[in-house]
């Protein structure tokens, strides 16, 4: 496999820090540029971070003295140094849309964690195990942007990163009709730690702006199909969600209820979860978990604190599968929100794009 030079746009943020740690020793990707806001530009990574480093491992040696670019003002300079960029910035949506298109139009592919382009019909939103085929829309997007190399690919929201993978093989086998998900989301999902979000201690906050809409709608794009120059959403499935912020550092848990056209047997569901693989595993992408869906028989699992780091935080944990009185089944699932749900999911998507030649 060729190696690629990569930039991190939003390197000082919670997701940007995860990118830095994941890419420190990546076999295919080497970080050659870091960028953030004008407040950080011109400072070394260590200076720009100040006291904000929230990872368990130290700031990567190879990056700590790199001088940050201004993500907007220095696009040309970043473009000269990289083959593609990861992007995770906290800016108004319309500004993120313009920023990502500006990089793509300078022939820099963008693999994004931001939600700004998730609804753009020719931007693939990909979980490599579920809908890798959606990257085939990229030539159509390049035609719209007028680019040869540049494009935008995104990952889906962290809230649904546990329940969509768990529902996916069941959808195929039994015809998913309706699902209800209540999510219990970690504070790192808001870019926060217990120090910067003291109001969450001894508390549950029953609102996360925009999250329920994403949790209900994004699965339909993931399960959609490429039709000409757009991705058309799945229409036959109804999803409803409530999203809570809970006092957990990392790891989003979901309580899920689901109804199917064909009533499934519980043992059959567990077998489908155990056997489930996607292109990420078949292509042996470096960040792919060997076993994507792990089922726990213990009645008190999965737990955020015990299970979020499973397979480097890239696997999804599932448990408590049982029949339901109103739906066919209910279960609990968990995924690490800044690993599989954010930076790790983007790195895996970039590996898929690299393996399929989209950065060449
Ligand atoms: P964060 O910790 O608040 O970090 C925000 C980053 O954006 C920082 O690097 C910041 O740079 C940069 N930034 C802010 N204003 C900017 C500007 N005008 N120009 C360029 N860069 C600017 O946020 P986060 O949690 O990492 O989230 C980043 C993005 O990822 C968001 O779109 C979020 O929705 C998405 N996301 C987050 C998660 C998660 O679990 N945290 C999951 C999925 C998706 P400075 O340090 O210079 O201000």
Image (cartoon, helix red, strand yellow):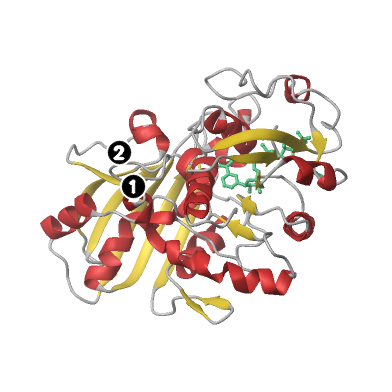
**Which residue is depicted at the point 78% across and 56% down?**
106
- Residue 13 picture location, percent across and down: 67, 35
- Give the SS element for disc 2: loop
Asked if residue 82 is positioned above or below residue 229 in the image, the reply reads: above
Q: Which residue is mark 1?
A: 333
65 with respect to 111 (left or right): right
- Residue 204's spot in the image, x, y percent? 51, 40
Tell me if mark 2 has few (under 14), some (14-19) or many (20+) residues whose alpha carbon lies within 10 angstroms of its own.
many
Circles 1 and 2: CB distance less than 8 Å? yes
Describe residue 266's horizontal placement relative to residue 360 as left or right.
left
User: For residue 17, which quarter of the picture?
Assistant: top right
- Closer to us: 171 or 132: 132
Q: Residues within 10 Å of mark 1 (few under 14, many from 20)?
A: many
The residue beneath circle 2 is 302
Q: CA distance from mark 1 to mark 2?
A: 7 Å
Residue 77, quarter of the rendered image: top right
In the rendered image, which quarter contains the C terminus? bottom right
Residue appearing at x 18%, y 37% in the figure: 298
Closest to the observer: 355 or 232? Answer: 355
Picture coordinates of residue 305, whole percent (x, y): 38, 29
**Residue shown at 59%/67% (left/top)?**
138
Mark nearer the N terminus (1 vs 2): 2
Out of 152 and 270, give the one closest to the viewer: 152
Kindly identify the residue that appears in the image at 30 percent across and 41 percent down.
290
**Horizontal side, residue 192 vs residue 300: left or right:** right
Residue 217 seen in this snapshot = no
């Amino acid at each position: 496999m060729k190696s690629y030079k990569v930039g991190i746009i939003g390197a000082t943020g919670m997701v940007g820090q995860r990118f830095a740690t994941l890419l420190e020793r990546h076999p295919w990707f080497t970080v050659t540029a870091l960028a953030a806001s004008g407040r950080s530009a011109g400072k070394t990574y260590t200076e720009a971070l100040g006291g904000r480093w929230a990872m368990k491992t130290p700031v990567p040696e190879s990056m700590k003295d790199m001088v940050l670019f201004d993500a907007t003002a220095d696009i040309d300079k970043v473009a000269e140094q990289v083959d593609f960029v990861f992007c995770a910035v906290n800016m108004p949506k319309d500004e993120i849309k313009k920023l990502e298109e500006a990089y793509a139009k300078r022939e820099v592919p963008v693999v994004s964690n931001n939600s700004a382009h998730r609804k753009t019909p020719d931007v693939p939103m990909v979980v490599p195990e579920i809908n890798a085929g959606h990257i085939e829309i990229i030539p159509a997007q390049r035609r719209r942007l007028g680019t040869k190399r540049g494009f935008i690919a995104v990952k889906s929201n962290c809230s649904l990163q546990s329940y969509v993978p768990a529902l996916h093989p069941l959808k195929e086998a039994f015809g998913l009709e309706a699902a209800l998900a209540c999510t219990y989301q970690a504070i790192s999902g808001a870019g926060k730690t217990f120090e910067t979000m003291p109001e969450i201690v001894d508390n549950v906050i029953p609102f996360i702006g925009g999250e329920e809409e994403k949790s209900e709608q994004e699965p339909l794009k993931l399960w959609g199909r490429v039709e000409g120059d757009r991705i058309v959403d799945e229409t036959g499935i109804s999803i409803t969600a409530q999203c809570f912020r809970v006092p957990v550092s990392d790891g989003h848990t979901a309580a899920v209820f689901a109804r199917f056209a064909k009533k499934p047997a519980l043992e059959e569901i567990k077998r489908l979860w155990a056997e489930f693989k996607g292109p990420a595993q078949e292509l042996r992408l470096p960040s792919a978990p060997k076993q994507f869906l792990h089922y726990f028989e213990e009645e008190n699992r999965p737990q955020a604190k015990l299970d979020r780091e499973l397979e480097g935080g890239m696997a999804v944990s599932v448990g408590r599968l049982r029949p339901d009185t109103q739906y066919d089944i209910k279960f609990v699932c968990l995924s690490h929100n800044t690993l599989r749900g954010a930076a790790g999911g983007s790195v895996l998507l970039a590996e898929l794009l690299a393996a399929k030649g989209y950065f060449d």
